[in-house]
């Protein structure tokens, strides 16, 4: 079990296991921000590859390394949450864990113990709002170029990233409209053949 040393019972067995009755029944919050390749770095690499005219090779080294890294991350994620659930069920403690991969656009993974759900209704919604705000702020600071630690630098960086994201969205929307037009033309041609 992954408990700080001050939570360990003085009555340790020879294999240094933590006694379940020694774990206090209190709220434990753990937030882990994993660091992996940033979305900006990935986009820049893909843009360079497209400029050179290289096709994306599914078996290139970078892709394999990324898949291996993501596999390890998912395994660790599963291990941590399994241990957390096991601890919460054995000790009946209040436990909340949130984990966010630093470049992910998805919400944080979380676990909330059954007792915390029972004893503190509404905890999850209030806490999620705070965790999401914290993770978003951490992601902006982490992605900001090194040396830009003032609030103005970070805000400027966030604004540049927002503009870049809007441009990508506009390109995707234009592609979508183009594809919709092609589909409509194909449907019309197909209807004319009948």
Image (cartoon, rainbow, N blue to C red):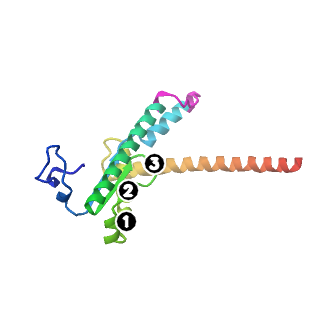
Q: Any mark on residue 124, and which?
A: 1
Helix, strand or loop for disc 2: strand
Residue 165 horizontal side relative to residue 143, left or right: right
Estimate the spatial distance between the alpha carbons at disc 3 and disc 1, rounded to whole Å. 30 Å
Label 1 close to label 2 by CB (< 8 Å): yes
**Taken as a whole, is the magenta stretch helix, strand or loop?**
loop
Q: Residues within 10 Å of mark 1 (few under 14, many from 20)?
A: some
The percent coordinates of residue 187 (x first, y second) are: 80, 50
The percent coordinates of residue 170 (x first, y second) are: 59, 50
Mark 2 lies on residue:
110
Q: Residue at horizontal 68%, vertical 50%?
A: 177
Q: Nearer the viewer, residue 142 or 37?
A: 37
Residue 59 lies in the magenta stretch:
yes
Q: Earlier in the sequence, mark 1 or mark 2?
A: 2
The percent coordinates of residue 15 (x first, y second) are: 17, 43
Helix, strand or loop for disc 3: helix
Q: Residue at horizontal 38%, vertical 51%?
A: 100
The percent coordinates of residue 90 (x first, y second) are: 27, 58
Label 3 close to label 2 by CB (< 8 Å): no
Label 3 close to label 1 by CB (< 8 Å): no
Residue 139 lies in the magenta stretch:
no
**Is residue 45 positioned above or below 100 on the image?**
above
Mark 3 lies on residue:
161
Q: Residues within 10 Å of mark 3 (few under 14, many from 20)?
A: some
The residue segment tinted magenta is 50-62
Residue 12 horizontal side relative to residue 125, left or right: left
Residue 85 found in image quarter? bottom left
Q: Nearer the viewer, residue 68 or 21?
A: 21
Q: Nearer the viewer, residue 52 or 69?
A: 69
Q: Earlier in the sequence, mark 3 or mark 2?
A: 2
Q: Nearer the viewer, residue 35 or 122?
A: 122
């Amino acid at each position: 079990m992954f408990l700080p040393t001050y939570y360990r019972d003085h009555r340790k067995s020879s294999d240094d296991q933590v006694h379940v009755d020694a774990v206090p029944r209190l709220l434990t919050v753990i937030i882990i921000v994993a660091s992996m390749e940033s979305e900006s770095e990935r986009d820049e690499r893909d843009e360079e590859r497209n400029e050179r005219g290289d096709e994306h090779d599914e078996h290139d080294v970078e892709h394999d390394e990324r898949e291996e890294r993501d596999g390890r991350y998912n395994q660790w994620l599963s291990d941590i949450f399994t241990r957390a659930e096991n601890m919460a069920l054995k000790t009946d403690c209040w436990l909340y864990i949130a984990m966010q991969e630093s470049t992910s656009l998805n919400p944080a993974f979380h676990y909330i113990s059954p007792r915390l759900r029972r004893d503190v209704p509404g905890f999850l919604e209030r806490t999620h709002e705070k965790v999401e705000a914290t993770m978003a702020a951490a992601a902006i600071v982490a992605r900001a170029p090194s040396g830009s630690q003032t609030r103005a630098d970070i805000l400027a960086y966030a604004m540049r990233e927002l503009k870049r994201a809007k441009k990508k969205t506009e390109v995707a929307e234009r592609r979508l409209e183009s594809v919709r037009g092609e589909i409509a033309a194909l449907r019309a041609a197909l209807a004319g053949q009948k």
